[in-house]
Amino acid sequence: MTMAKIEKLLAQIRKNPNDVNFTDLVKICNHYFGEPRQEGTSHCVYKTPWAGNPRVNIQEKNGKAKFYQVKQVLEAIDKIKEIEDEEL
């Protein structure tokens, strides 16, 4: 996906985090975190670049992403962007 499409999808998710298609969240996670280190089960686990609990875990429920996991993904993306801004 192009960066413009990712940003548009991310904006839609931020606008309505309660109704996110799981496949859309996977696209966002793959872009920001790389390929999941675990997939093919009910969970996709992504590694993040900081110490502590460096992972994002998402799972599908009836084709949708769970709200609290969408929130965690958005927080992790914000943290990544914060780190990138500090490095500039």
Image (cartoon, grey):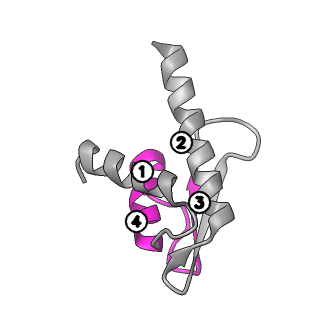
Q: What residue sits right under mark 3 in the picture?
A: 70
Q: Tell me if 24 is positioned left or right of 82 in this view.
A: left
Could you tell me which quadrant the N terminus lies in? Answer: bottom left
Where 63 sits versus 5, above or below?
below
Q: Give yes or no for contact between labels 2 and 1 (Cβ–Cβ under 8 Å).
A: yes
Residue 79 image label: none
In whole angstroms, how far apart are the C-alphas of marks 4 and 2?
A: 15 Å
In whole angstroms, how far apart are the C-alphas of marks 2 and 1?
A: 10 Å
**Chain-order first, disc 2 or disc 1:** 1
Q: Residues within 10 Å of mark 1 (few under 14, many from 20)?
A: some
Three-letter code, disc 4: Asp
Please identify the residue farthest to the front as the structure is shown: 15
Could you tell me which quadrant the C terminus lies in? Answer: top left
Three-letter code, disc 3: Val
Q: Give yes or no for contact between labels 4 and 2 (Cβ–Cβ under 8 Å).
A: no
Label 4: state its secondary structure: helix
Residue 77 image label: 2
Q: Please name whichever residue, 15 or 76, is drawn nearer the observer in this view of the structure.
A: 15
Q: What residue appears at the point 52 percent right and 77 percent down from the top-left corner?
A: 64
Number of callouts:
4
Residue 24 image label: 4
**Chain-order first, disc 1 or disc 4:** 1
Residue 29: in magenta span: yes
Q: Position of residue 49 (x, y in %)?
A: 58, 37
Q: What residue appears at the point 65 percent right and 35 percent down from the top-left corner?
A: 50
In whole angstroms, how far apart are the C-alphas of marks 3 and 4?
A: 11 Å
**Where are the magenta residues, as a range?**
22-47
In whole angstroms, how far apart are the C-alphas of marks 3 and 2?
A: 11 Å
**Chain-order first, disc 4 or disc 2:** 4
Residue 61: in magenta span: no
Q: What residue sits right under mark 1 in the picture?
A: 10
